[in-house]
Amino acid sequence: MSVTEMEREQEPRQASFGLVAWLRWAWRTLTSMKTALILLFLLALGSVPGSLVPQRGVEPDKVARIYEQNPVLAEWYDRFQLFEVFTSTWFAAVYLLLFASLIGCIIPRTSTYLRELRRKPPAAPKNLSRLPHSASFEGDLGVKEAAWRLRKLRFRVVAGDGWVSAEKGYLRETGNLLFHVSLLGILLAIGAGSLFGYRGNVLVVEGDGFANTVAAYDRFIPGNQVSAESLEPFSFQLAEFKAAYQVTGDKRGQALDYSAHLKVNDSPTAPTRDYELKVNEPLEINGTQTYLIGNGYAPVFKVTDGKGQVAFEGPVACLIEEKATLTSGCVVKVPDAQPSQLGFLLQFMPTSVPLTNGGYASAFPGELNPEVQILGAFSGDLGVRSGRPQSVYTLAEPEVLKKLDRLFMGAGTPKPLAVGQSVDLPKGLGKLEFTGVKEWITLQTAYDPGRMPALLAAGTAVVAIAFSLMIRRRRVFVRISEGRVDVGGLTRTEGSAAGFAEEFADIVKVLSAGEKDVR
């Protein structure tokens, strides 16, 4: 063998980093405290758009308005799942990673903590004056007496030949560990709610009823383990809705109170009972909660077609366009009208007042002078029988709208209609009559079996973090030799030495009780 070959064999070989090593590195990184804090921050950061951007499951009308006013922005929101933040893929990924990280943190820390609980305090050092806190006094204090006094101060005590060692503050680590367990409990409760809970939204007009069935919801979001039979079989009728507004002062028009009067049946065989539904005061039936989340107006129209037949009659829920005055946009589709289908774009004004430019606007959200302005009236094929789904809040697709005949539009529209007034359509196509005003409410029904466990876990987390921040781990040592008592103390928590100084002075006083020459 040549010298060069021998030198090559003596060179250190680089260790290979295989799959197992990569997996170990990934697990150590995932279960580190730094990673857990980053994931917790990302989870909180990811919740921000859920509060700023309207969510489909809570405010579907606002989501629809964004699509109408800014379809490009709405498309980007939808692409990043910002309309459904808490059920999005990226939010679930952060949630599951945090779940795995907490488990990886808790298991080893629990075993370490259990070993620490069984471990006795160490023997007292020989030179206590080197400790951060120390004192000495003359007296005939014995080892048993010193140990007894320290036990009365709730220290864990170990005594030896001429020395006593005491320690307390174990609840600090208990609180720290319990805090992590509580976070895990919160995640588990949220997961249970996602699997076995459901959420639904529905719009109900005064006089109409609602039964808690999947088909009755405008939007229904079930958990993976929820079936149609899982829903609580209750029903109710909206008898009346009342809204009170400030009528004078700088805050004129501000809402003061909302109240929905319901006729509730807790089950198909249960008797009817009255219930007053208010904001933040949900109707609760066996864990299923129904919240009042919105309201608006539903003017009542009657459309007579060109053949003298009533082709449409009933309330029409209008979308709010101006929150301050509840000016709302309405769409009326009459596909059964003869000889041609009819469609109307309308604006409802709860308190209509004339403007100096000849137009009209609502001056107050309450129903003081309700009027309806016809923005456009059309005849022709609305495309409702094309098989393509349509929104009840839009008249037709743009390409269909271009093909319709315009009966009223722009400057040719008549004056606003008051209750009881009507307008005849051109070409003998019929008549539109404004017959009354009702109100609608939007409700969110939610069943979340993890709600109370999450609340208990959150409360436990608060108590646990208080223990972790307020309790200090500290040790006290006592050495007794020939009538001289030396006391030393130290803390095992950074930044708590200043707070321990007063406690150490009190411990020395307890040990030297009845003795003199304390220094």
Image: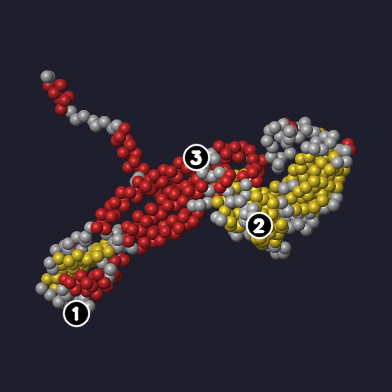
- Residue furthest to the front in view is 269
Q: Mark yes or no: residue 325 visible.
A: no
Q: Which colour scheme is used?
A: secondary structure
Q: Which of 144 and 273 is in front in this view?
A: 273
Looking at numbered disc 2 in the image, what kind of residue is underneath it?
Val
Element assignment for label 3: helix
Q: What element carries label 2?
A: strand
Q: Which of marks 1 and 3 is nearer the N terminus?
A: 3
Q: Which residue is drawn at 88% across and 36% down?
A: 427
Q: Nearer the viewer, residue 76 or 175?
A: 175
Q: Does residue 509 sit above or below 76 in this rendering? A: below
Mark 3 Cα shell of 10 Å, populated few (<14), some (14-19), many (≥20): few
**In the rendered image, which quarter is residue 273 located in?**
bottom right
At 66% across and 59% down in the image, what residue appears? Answer: 271
Q: In this view, does 46 lie to the left or right of 63?
A: left
* Cα gap from disc 1 to disc 3, whole angstroms: 71 Å
Find the distance from the CA under tag 3 to the CA under tag 2. Answer: 38 Å
Please indicate whether residue 476 sits to the left or right of residue 467 in the image: left
> Dot 2 corresponds to which residue?
264
Q: Position of residue 481 (x, y in %)?
A: 12, 71
Which of the two discs, 2 and 1, labels the residue nearer the N terminus? 2
Mark number displayed over residue 516: 1
The residue sitting at the top extreme is 1
Residue 354 percent coordinates (x, y): 81, 53
Q: Name the residue under label 3.
A: 89
